[in-house]
Image (tube, rainbow, N blue to C red):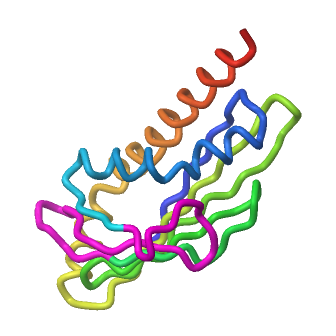
């Protein structure tokens, strides 16, 4: 099952990429939602091969999670593959400069069940597809608004 969302952001590509790859901020947001994540190897800068392990809440239950960045090309793409309980996920962010002052971020989330219970979770997500897309788009919009505010503030 795949979910796709796209957002245009009024800020240069370099700033947008840097903002969307700020894992300290992303981890803080996830921790606020009940996740318990630990960086494997204590890395500071994201790159191919870095990852996390821990536990997240999904559909009301705590599930083990293991994630790794499998593709990382500066200002182009970042792919994070995760194993969440009995489900494999692939989260891809693509970055594109539309013009010097505007960028586009495209997010794709693919879910693949590996167990019967994961199939049931995905089945329930199919029924809530609109809500999942709304949350995904909301995340891109929220992060985009933060980047735009930061960019405007830097202009003076």
Relative vertical location of residue 11 with respect to residue 81 in this rendering, above or below:
above
Residue ID at (72%, 9%)? 156
Which part of the image, by quadrant, shows the N terminus? bottom left
Quadrant of residue 38 in the image?
bottom left
Lateral position of residue 13 relative to residue 62, left or right:
right
Relative vertical location of residue 20 with respect to residue 149 in this rendering, above or below:
below
Residue ID at (65%, 74%)? 71
Asked if the stretch drawn in magenta spans residue 25, the answer is: no
On the image, the x and y values in percent for residue 119 come to 26, 81
Residue at the extreme left of the image, as rendered: 61
Lateral position of residue 45 relative to residue 40, left or right:
right
Asked if the stretch drawn in magenta spans residue 45, the answer is: yes
On the image, the x and y values in percent for residue 152 come to 68, 17
Residue ID at (61%, 46%)? 6
Highlighted range, magenta: 39-65
Relative vertical location of residue 150 with respect to residue 79 in this rendering, above or below:
above
């Amino acid at each position: 099952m795949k979910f796709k969302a796209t957002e245009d952001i009024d800020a240069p590509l370099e700033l947008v990429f840097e903002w969307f790859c700020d894992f300290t901020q992303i981890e803080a947001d996830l921790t606020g939602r009940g996740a318990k994540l630990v960086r494997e190897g204590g890395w500071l800068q994201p790159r191919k091969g870095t990852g996390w392990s821990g536990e997240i809440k999904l559909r009301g239950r705590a599930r083990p999670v293991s994630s790794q960045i499998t593709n990382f090309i500066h200002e182009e793409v970042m792919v994070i593959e995760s194993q969440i309980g009995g489900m494999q996920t692939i989260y891809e962010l693509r970055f594109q400069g539309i013009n010097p002052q505007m960028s586009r971020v495209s997010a794709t989330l693919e879910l693949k069940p590996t167990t019967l219970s994961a199939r049931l979770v995905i089945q329930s997500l199919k029924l809530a597809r609109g809500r999942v897309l709304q949350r995904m788009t909301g995340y891109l919009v929220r992060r985009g608004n933060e980047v735009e505010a930061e960019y405007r503030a830097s202009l003076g």
